[in-house]
Amino acid sequence: MRISWGYKIFIAYSLFAAGILFLAYKASRQNFDLVTENYYDAELKYQDVIDQKSNVAVLSEAPRVSHTLKTVSLQLPAEFANKSVRGEMYLYRPSDAGKDIRKNFSTQDGFYQLDLGKDLSGAYELKLSWEAGGKRFYHEKRLFF
């Protein structure tokens, strides 16, 4: 049995249309997370982040960050020994906003350990900001768990 060219064109067009509809359906079900809800406001305030990064650049060394599956440890440079330091650790997961971890901390000796309470896996961006002596500091580091 031979199929005429008219039916072949109809079948090809129908398969193409079904494929486009399937892709549109899959795209509408895709989950996406924004880096921040107020992107424009954060962009306007980015000069503050640049200034805070330059404050870190003049320190004797960058903060040392080490991690295991359940903890993240922070050792600040020697300039912060015996000083009151308060700040925030933000573990940002680019692929899933539901797995982000944000924790405020304070220390007197320049050391802080964050207990995560669960095993993490994947890539995280550690966004560390702290304040001491009226100056603000900001440091970023990529962590792989």
Image (cartoon, rainbow, N blue to C red):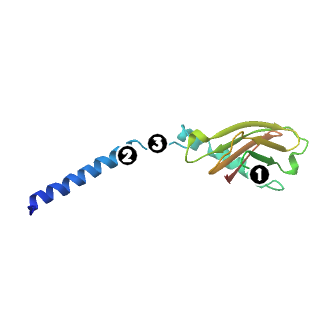
Q: Position of residue 113 (x, y in %)?
A: 80, 43
Q: CA distance from mark 2 to mark 1?
A: 40 Å
Label 3: few (<14), some (14–19) or many (≥20) C-alpha neighbours in 10 Å: few
Q: Amino acid at mark 1?
A: Val
- Compute the Cα span from label 1 to label 3: 31 Å
Q: Earlier in the sequence, mark 1 or mark 3?
A: 3
Q: Can residue 135 be seen here?
A: no
x, y percent for residue 131: 78, 40
Question: Residue at 78% across / 47% down in the picture?
Answer: 73
| SS of the residue under disc 1 | strand
Label drawn at residue 79: none
- Image quarter of the N terminus: bottom left
> Which residue type carries mark 2?
Lys
* Residue occupying image coordinates x 57% and y 48%: 94
Count of numbered circles in the view = 3
Question: Label 2: which residue?
Answer: 26
**Label 2–label 1 contact, CB within 8 A:** no
* Residue annotated with mark 3: 31
Q: Secondary structure at mark 2?
A: helix
Mark 3 vs mark 2: which is more N-terminal?
2
Q: Which residue is mark 1?
A: 65
Q: Label 3: state its secondary structure.
A: loop
In the picture as drawn, the residue positioned furthest to the right comes out as 82
Determine crowd level at label 1: few under 14, some 14-19, many 20+ residues with C-alpha closer than 10 A: some
Q: Judge by depth and name the residue closer to the eye, 60 or 16.
A: 16
Is residue 20 visible in this depiction of the protein?
Answer: yes
How far apart are the alpha carbons under marks 3 and 2? Answer: 10 Å
Q: Looking at the image, is 7 positioned above or below residue 111?
A: below
| 112 relative position to 144: left or right | right
